[in-house]
């Protein structure tokens, strides 16, 4: 707590001076920037496929249901991140299984499970005694508080996701554009679907610590949606999504530092403004033509 107070004091003292050099000298700021860029790349990579496969609401559901994992971590006096990872993994796989095994529409299943999990999580918060700092951090995000363990987890997940996507890129593209054709051509559709859901669920868990439960879905969806406005060519769209995700995350962190704003919302706000700017530019270009 004492170190946090010192950091916050120095943070407030530096921010009004717009002194980027001094700002970057703090270890917590260096970790925040590294984490933001890594998560931006990861969000752009997986978010592009999630958007095209209409899994945006899936990541939203997993993010909000993760509240149970957060509360369990607080109640058991464990690092919430270590509870988030297995919980979101199991939750994501179970939800996909329910979708496959019922005749209900996927959005209906997601709404039901999300509502039930969120209700359980909210009720469980009443059993959290005293200080709720860890709970608030995960709910609203605090990328300035990420540690080396969080960075290592993000790097490992980014490496695993990159290997999985790149080694199966053609099959992933076919599965994204036409699952029936992929099935006919012998692509192991279920294996790839569940593999992607596992990576997406774990990415949501990692991003929650930085962005928060309430905004994690936007972190995955906005960069990919912005890239989709610019290009419909798949490889270019994928590259743009990664670039937009990492760049806006970096800019968001700097905006947060300079103006002393909350880090997670600052990143999402920059991404939202980027989306609006690209949208307006595309519309004006069409009108000019």
Image (spheres, helix red, strand yellow):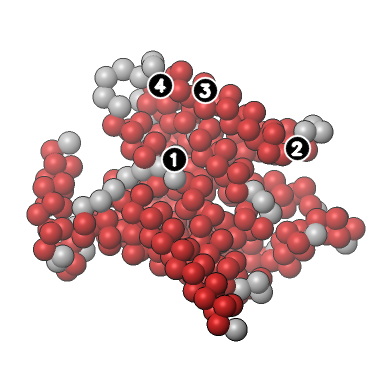
- Residue at label 3? 119
Asked whether, in this view, residue 229 is left or right of residue 7, the answer is right
Q: Residues within 10 Å of mark 3 (few under 14, many from 20)?
A: some
- Residue at label 1? 214
Dot placed on the residue nearer the N-terminal end, 2 or 1? 2
- Residue at label 4? 125
Distance in Å between CA atoms under marks 2 and 1: 24 Å
- Residue at label 2? 105
| Element on which disc 4 rests | helix
Q: Residues within 10 Å of mark 2 (few under 14, many from 20)?
A: few
Task: Give me the residue at 64% from left, 62% from top.
Answer: 165
Residue 185, position in %: x, y? 88, 61
Asked whether, in this view, residue 1 is left or right of residue 32, the answer is left
Distance in Å between CA atoms under marks 3 and 1: 15 Å
Distance in Å between CA atoms under marks 3 and 4: 10 Å
Dot placed on the residue nearer the N-terminal end, 3 or 4? 3
**Of circles 3 and 4, which is in front?**
3
Q: Nearer the viewer, residue 30 or 258?
A: 258
Dot placed on the residue nearer the N-terminal end, 1 or 4? 4
Dot placed on the residue nearer the N-terminal end, 3 or 2? 2
Q: Please, which residue is most extreme toward the bottom here?
A: 289
Q: Is residue 116 above or below residue 157?
A: above
Do the CB atoms of the residues marked 1 and 4 lie less than 8 Å apart? no
Residue 201, position in %: x, y? 57, 44
Do the CB atoms of the residues marked 3 and 1 lie less than 8 Å apart? no
Specify the label residue 89 is tagged with. Answer: none
């Amino acid at each position: 707590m004492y170190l946090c107070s010192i950091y916050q004091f120095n943070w407030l003292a530096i921010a009004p001076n717009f002194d980027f050099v001094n700002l970057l000298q703090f270890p917590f700021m260096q970790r925040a920037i590294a984490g933001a860029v890594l998560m931006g790349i990861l969000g752009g990579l997986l978010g592009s496929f999630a958007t095209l496969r209409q899994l945006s609401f899936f990541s939203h559901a997993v993010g909000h249901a993760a509240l149970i994992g957060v509360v369990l971590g607080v109640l058991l006096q464990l690092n919430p991140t270590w509870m988030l990872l297995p919980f979101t993994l199991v939750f994501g796989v179970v939800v996909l299984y329910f979708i496959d095994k019922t005749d209900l529409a996927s959005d209906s299943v997601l709404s039901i499970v999300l509502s039930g999990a969120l209700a359980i999580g909210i009720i469980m918060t009443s059993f959290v005694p005293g200080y709720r700092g860890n709970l608030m951090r995960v709910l609203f995000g605090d990328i300035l508080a990420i540690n080396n363990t969080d960075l290592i987890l993000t790097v490992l997940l980014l490496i695993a996701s990159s290997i999985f996507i790149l080694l199966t890129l053609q099959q992933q593209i076919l599965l994204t554009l036409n699952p029936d054709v992929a099935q006919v051509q012998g692509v192991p559709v279920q294996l790839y679907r569940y593999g992607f859901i596992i990576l997406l669920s774990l990415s949501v868990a990692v991003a929650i610590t930085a962005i928060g439960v309430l905004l994690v879905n936007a972190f995955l969806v906005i960069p990919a949606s912005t890239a989709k406005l610019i290009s419909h060519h798949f490889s270019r769209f994928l590259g743009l999504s990664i670039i937009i995700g990492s760049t806006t995350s970096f800019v968001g962190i700097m905006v947060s530092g300079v103006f002393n704003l909350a880090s997670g919302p600052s990143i999402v706000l920059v991404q939202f403004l980027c989306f609006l700017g690209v949208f307006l530019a595309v519309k004006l270009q069409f009108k000019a033509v």
